[in-house]
Image: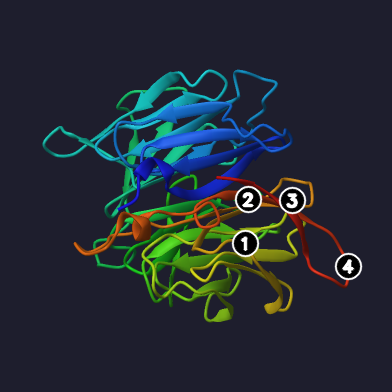
Amino acid sequence: MDDGALYVSPLSFPSCDAIFILSGQCRLNAFSSLADSYAANLVVSEGESVYDYCWYPYMSSSNPDLCVFATSTRDHPIHLWDANTGQLRCTYRAYDAMDEIIAAFSIGFNPNGNKIFAGYNKTIRVFEVHRPGRDFQQYSTLLGNKEGQSGIISSIAFSPTYSGMLAAGSYSQTTAIYREDNMELLYVLHGQEGGVTQVQFSKDGNYLYTGGRKDPYVLCWDIRKTVDIVYKLYRSSEGTNQRIQFDIEPLGRYLGTGGQDGLVHIYDLQTGQWVSSFRAALDTINGLAFHPFLPMAATSSGHRRYGGLDNSEQNKTLSGDENCVSVWSFFSSTGDDAASADTRC
């Protein structure tokens, strides 16, 4: 197996000038997306594997009070970190019936930024941001009549239009839509081939996109009429257990997704049709994120390798073209859609 500290997985643009990366299992790194430096501006190390992280919705590098992000780690409470100093600000703790700390598998700030919603096994807990500690509201996702969602709540996303709706994906291959204020279950979506690993609303809040583990399709749902799947967007992911990240560009017209074949595919969300693709690495593209407003995107690649006793160390080592973060510039032309890439390995 390769060195976990060198393993790169999904990433995000928390602001206009930063890229945030989860590398290995326990380390988070922030890089400048506009500078030529390859050194991380911030490194935060957790004690165990990081399950999920999210940025404060009003995050601003110029305002230290708002420059924070939250992490959820195995066997640990939710941590709120200062993104300028890397210092721990506070914790949000959930306990089981034996009064032992249990970790959230997914977390997300609501659009107003005053609550953290956290996904657990058949449960969503809601913490007040300004009240750290063990105070929370608890909601079961499985109703008494066995309707709702079973399994681990693995992903959470909020409608960007402040409509008061949130989507929660589960490893039980379902996605549910809830009301944010009282967690009323509105409906459950079935159709994912694997456990749901990502949910994301369209920019207008009318559509929801979901992806699953070892599922070759990103599904599009019209949440105004949830009877059928609107269309499916293909990506190569049948042979990997990794989460394959997708993202929607700032104007809401196109969706990009990685895959285990090293390609990034771009789809037109108005038609559901493939537009273009480009090779981003020689290994699995597990992360993709668009810049908040510039024609740029970042991709991360790599996966863990478990060799047999007769495998050499050379075969288990990732090269720079396989395990790296790349920043891409996009432009409109009749040629290639991706310009030169700045690669950080």
- Residue 216, label in figure: none
Check if mark 1's residue and mark 2's residue have beta carbons within 8 Å: yes
Q: Amino acid at mark 2?
A: Ser
Element on which disc 4 rests: loop
x, y percentage for residue 190? 42, 75
The residue tagged 4 is 333
Residue 303 visible in rendering: yes
Separation of residues labelled 4 and 1 (CA atoms): 19 Å
Element on which disc 2 rests: strand
Q: Is residue 144 above or below residue 192?
A: above
Between circles 4 and 1, the one closer to the viewer is 1
Separation of residues labelled 2 and 4 (CA atoms): 21 Å
x, y percentage for residue 96? 18, 39
The residue tagged 3 is 296
Residue ID at (47%, 48%): 8
Decide which of tag 4 and tag 1 comes sooner along the chain. Answer: 1
Residue ID at (34%, 50%): 2
Q: Nearer the viewer, residue 71 or 205?
A: 71
Q: Amino acid at mark 1?
A: Ala
Check if mark 2's residue and mark 3's residue have beta carbons within 8 Å: no
